[in-house]
Image (cartoon, rainbow, N blue to C red):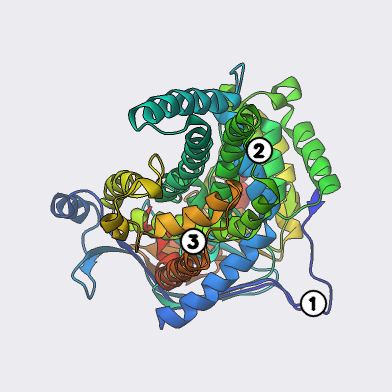
Amino acid sequence: MDALVLPQPSAEARLPVLEFQAGRPGQQGGRLLGQDLREGARLWRLAVTLGWLDIKLRYRGSLLGPFWLTLSTGAMVGSLGVLYATLWKMNVREYLPYLALSQVLWGFIAMVVSEGCTLFTSVETLIRSVRMPFFVHAQRLIVRNALVLAHNALVVIVMFAVLDTWPGWRALYALPAILVWVVDGMAIGMLLGAMCARFRDIPPIVGSLMQIFFFLTPVIWTPKQLPPGLNWVMLGNPFFDVLEVARAPLLGAWPGTHVWIAALVFSALLCGIAWWFLARARGRIAFWI
Amino acid sequence: MAGAEIEVAGLSVFFPLYHGSARSLKKTVFAAASGRLAQDRNRRVVVQALRDVSFRLGVGDRLGLIGGNGAGKTTLLRTLAGIYEPVMGRVRVAGSLHALLDPQLGMNADLTGRENIMLRGLYGGLSKPEIARLEEDVIDFAGLADFIDLPVRIYSSGMVVRLGFGLATAIRPQVVLMDEWFLAGDSEFMEKARARLEDMVRGADILVLSTHQTGVAREWCSRVIWLDQGAVRADGPPDAVLEAYLGHPLPPLAVEEAA
């Protein structure tokens, strides 16, 4: 029979070894988490395919497919933009691209956070039937939402073209922000995925918090609209700094060094907390889901 | 090359009961598995799925796990497969490992057969040409023809089993962990399936098989462990352990086959 042979280790190479030694959960947890990340990263082709199939499945049988996203985002941004620009007496040419970009970027953040809550509980049968690095699921989350973001980005591009408000070469400043977003997205997905598997009350709490942050973060309103005394609203809001490092360059501005520093500090904190929690929780996820 | 090896020492696995109403759940489970509930340090209710299990397997060993429903057979297989990580004790599995635990093997019913095969291949770290070969092999075995490009959801249950089986047995590991569902199926398919399964098992260094059919355990295994409520009740050559398990002497193997 012509069957496949798994990549067999050569005579000198060591056999693949799976080893667990109970005790000292913190120390072993860190080692196993590192191994999970390494093995997960090696399976990136699987993660990309899974994320891509998620989108394909969601729109299988639909005529426009994921371009429905583009259409509905475009319709919402267009109507909201004109409405708010009128209400707040703002320059449509300035406000519309700002709103379109902010909405699209916030959509990515909000989706990563809410889907992060079900990162592991939604693939419970898979987790219980094969050993797969948990990191694969985090990569899949980012790939899936990056594809959604790419479709929504068309709205922003059309807006730039119609209103002729191209950001110019400064948009390149957004490149390092993409890296921050990918790392943060995977960290928050892993963290929330594990926490929500254990504590089933967290997803609704996260949902309401995100609603509050949507209004506290300048997404539909601009920082300039804040009365001078109210600037503290944005201070200490991690979503503002992380959003701004990507948004400002795409509007042709430099986000400001202090914003970048804050974004990096918040990201480091998030990664630190995620590492600390997952080093302890990773081995228990299969029991929790 | 050093051979495959499995080492299990003092292994215990507890299931915490978090979700649902702990109290009423506590009562229900108490009735079903009396003596296996305990409270851990944080006073949480836990089910002791495995208690202080130890054994060692080397190249050529064919271990059968027997025991009633809920004896811990599947939990032990999942622990060996690295899905459940133990709270107490040590588990070491050396060698490429393949676990046949779930008939669907994590297949996504909304995806087509071909897409499911591709995902399996990617999971195994196979290259594009290797995935193409896997596809060919599985499609050929499962006899799905045009159905391969349709979602698994619309397959008949027989087709799903054939696809799952073909996929699971297309890989040549050193250590095979197998749940008994793999030996259940309609007789016509089983004849074809058995040859393929035996071929895979022969090629493997170690087999761990969970079953409660004593005939299967006698035929396939060189050693049998009887699990009872998560603990090892007996461990030894198949006939001795199976006689203790059944509580009566076994008929000679040839007679059983003729029957």
Q: Which residue is mark 1?
A: A13
Question: Of A107 and A276, which appears nearest the observer?
Answer: A107
The residue lying at 78 percent from left, 43 percent from top is B134
The kind of residue tagged 1 is Ala
Q: Quadrant of the N terminus of chain A?
A: top right
Measured in 3D between alpha carbons, the distance from the residue under mark 2 to the one under mark 1, in whole angstroms, is 31 Å
Rendered location of residue B151, percent (x, y): 62, 26
Circles 2, 1 touching at the beta carbon (< 8 Å): no
Secondary structure at badge 2 equals: helix
Question: Of A166 and B120, which appears nearest the observer?
Answer: A166
Image quadrant assignment for residue B104: top right
Q: Are marks 3 and 2 on the same chain?
A: no
Other-residue count near label 1 (Cα within 10 Å), few / some / many at <14 / 14–19 / ≥20: few
Answer left or right for A195 relative to A244: left
Measured in 3D between alpha carbons, the distance from the residue under mark 3 to the one under mark 1, in whole angstroms, is 33 Å
The kind of residue tagged 3 is Ala
Rendered location of residue A169, percent (x, y): 71, 51
Residue B252 visible to the viewer: no
Residue A187 bears which disc, if any? 3
Rendered location of residue A277, percent (x, y): 40, 69
Q: Which residue is mark 2?
A: B116
